[in-house]
Image (spheres, rainbow, N blue to C red):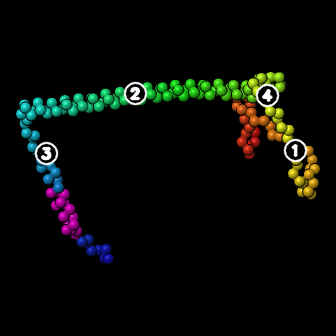
Amino acid sequence: MAAHRKPKQRTLSSRTALTLALAGVAGATAFEGSGHAEPRLTPAQVKARADRLYQEAEEATDKYNGAKEEVRRAEASLEALRDEAARRTARLNAARDALGSMATASTGTAASTPPSSSPSPPTPTRTYEAPPSRNGSATGGPPPSPPPAARSPNSPGYAPRPPAGCVS
């Protein structure tokens, strides 16, 4: 409170003294065993240890070689599966091309359709019945035109439509 008084001298608290004492004891026990050298091994002990290490190295090498062989087999299997997938994809593409050709031919003239072994049934003619209009009459104007035929990506002149809501 009074600025003219001498500040009080601080002494070590019991907590600080205890911390320093424990740190000293921990340091002494940690470095206690590091000053001694390992006892000398006899030649028989050295030979036994070397034999054990060689045996461990041989086992590790056998494990490594087994894993390497397993990887080689897995890679060969993967390559065979990739080849099979490529063959099936090629076969599927050929079937799609043939189907596209047949679809294109069937939309052309009737003379271009391949002959069939059995006579095909006549195609039924659909009549359009207009739904009743708001006033109840069935004559609401001409029937709507049918939707355009869907084109496959393999057909000539195919152009994908932009998604709804996109302005091109």
Residue 16: image location, x then y, percent: 21, 64
* Residue furthest front as drawn: 118
Secondary element under disc 2, as helix, strand or loop, is helix
Density class for disc 3 (Cα within 10 Å; few <14, some 14-19, many ≥20) is: few
Instruction: Give the residue pinned by disc 2.
Output: 73
Q: Which image quarter: residue 52?
A: top left
State how far apart marks 3 and 4 are (Cα). Answer: 102 Å
| Predominant secondary structure, magenta span | helix
Instruction: Give the residue pinned by disc 3.
Output: 34
Lateral position of residue 104 relative to residue 15, left or right:
right
Query: Of circles 4 and 1, which is in front?
Result: 4
Residue 35: image location, x then y, percent: 11, 44
Q: Which image quarter: residue 24?
A: bottom left
Q: Which residue type does callout 2 highlight?
A: Arg
* Residue furthest bottom as drawn: 1
State how far apart marks 1 and 2 are (Cα). Answer: 65 Å
**At 91% across and 44% down in the image, what residue appears?**
142
State how far apart marks 4 and 2 are (Cα). Answer: 55 Å
Query: Of circles 1 and 2, which is in front?
Result: 1
Instruction: Give the residue pinned by disc 1.
Output: 128
State how far apart marks 4 and 1 are (Cα). Answer: 27 Å
Density class for disc 2 (Cα within 10 Å; few <14, some 14-19, many ≥20) is: few
Which part of the image, by quadrant, shows the N terminus?
Answer: bottom left
State how far apart marks 1 and 3 are (Cα). Answer: 102 Å
Instruction: Give the residue pinned by disc 4.
Output: 119
Disc number placed over residue 147 in the picture, else none: none
Q: Which residue type does callout 4 highlight?
A: Pro
Sequence order check, earlier mark of 1 and 3? 3
Secondary element under disc 1, as helix, strand or loop, is loop
